[in-house]
Image (cartoon, rainbow, N blue to C red):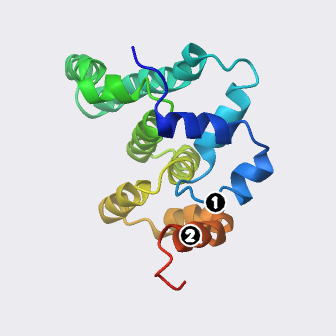
Amino acid sequence: NQSLWLDEASQAFMSQKSIYFIIFERTGDFHPPLSYILYHFWMMVGTSEIWLRLLPVVFGVATVFVVYKICQKLFNGKIAIIAALLLATAPYHVYYSQEIRMYSMTAFFASLSMYYLQSAKKLGYVLSTVALLLTHYTGIFLVAAQLLYKRDLKLLGLIFLIYTPWLPLFWNQLANEYPLINI
């Protein structure tokens, strides 16, 4: 029930640009590129506010399903249903699953990363974790916690190797965001 606010409008505006622009020329923005790229392709179908808000809804609903699967694997079906119901009705989850930003994507990729970590499906874990890191920088905290839990340096090395091409662009964003830091 709200119109686009500044960050959402900025997300939509930048997502309409070329993939090259999204990856290499987004100055003044301190976020990884994956959500912009996903929105870029999503906006090829439509640009109405309802259509733009549908993408985070899809990720929000998918997150509820992934949380259900995690809890089903770790506990049982009854607890999985309760956990999914709690997430599906959590006010912050509902709110951010309608916002034209990367937050519901971050929750989805973080949940998927945890699911694959618990399932010991290494390729799924690596891909979902890299997607998380390319969606929001806070994903590094989950990766650090997972490393403490799993201590699999080979997987972490593979994730870092795949993520490495983004590092120079991250440092550039960091220098633009915090000009007093000489990187």
Can residue 101 be seen here? Answer: no
> Could you tell me which residue is drawn at 47 percent across and 82 percent down?
181
Q: Position of residue 177 (x, y in %)?
A: 50, 67
Q: Is residue 87 above or below residue 20?
A: above
Q: Is residue 136 above or below residue 106?
A: below
> Residue tagged by mark 2?
176
Crowding near the residue tagged with mark 2, few <14, some 14–19, many ≥20 C-alpha atoms within 10 Å: some
Nearer-N-terminus badge (1/2): 1
> Residue tagged by mark 1?
27
Secondary element at image label 1: loop
Please identify the quadrant where the N terminus is shown: top left
- Which mark, residue 97? none
Please identify the quadrant where the C terminus is shown: bottom right
Q: Is residue 171 above or below residue 62?
A: below
Q: CA distance from mark 1 to mark 2?
A: 7 Å
**Which residue is the extreme one toward the bottom?**
182
Can residue 46 be seen here? Answer: yes
Q: Position of residue 12 (x, y in %)?
A: 62, 34
Secondary element at image label 2: helix
Report whether 175 appears left or right of 116.
right
Which amino acid type is marked by label 1?
Thr
Report whether 139 appears left or right of 8.
left
Residue 88: image quadrant is: top left
Crowding near the residue tagged with mark 1, few <14, some 14–19, many ≥20 C-alpha atoms within 10 Å: few
Which amino acid type is marked by label 2?
Asn
> Could you tell me which residue is drawn at 51 percent across and 54 percent down?
133
Tell me, yes or no, whether the two marked residues, 1 and 2, touch with CB atoms within 8 Å. yes
Residue closer to the observer: 103 or 74: 103
Residue closer to the observer: 66 or 138: 138
Q: Position of residue 18 (x, y in %)?
A: 79, 44
Q: Position of residue 175 (x, y in %)?
A: 55, 74
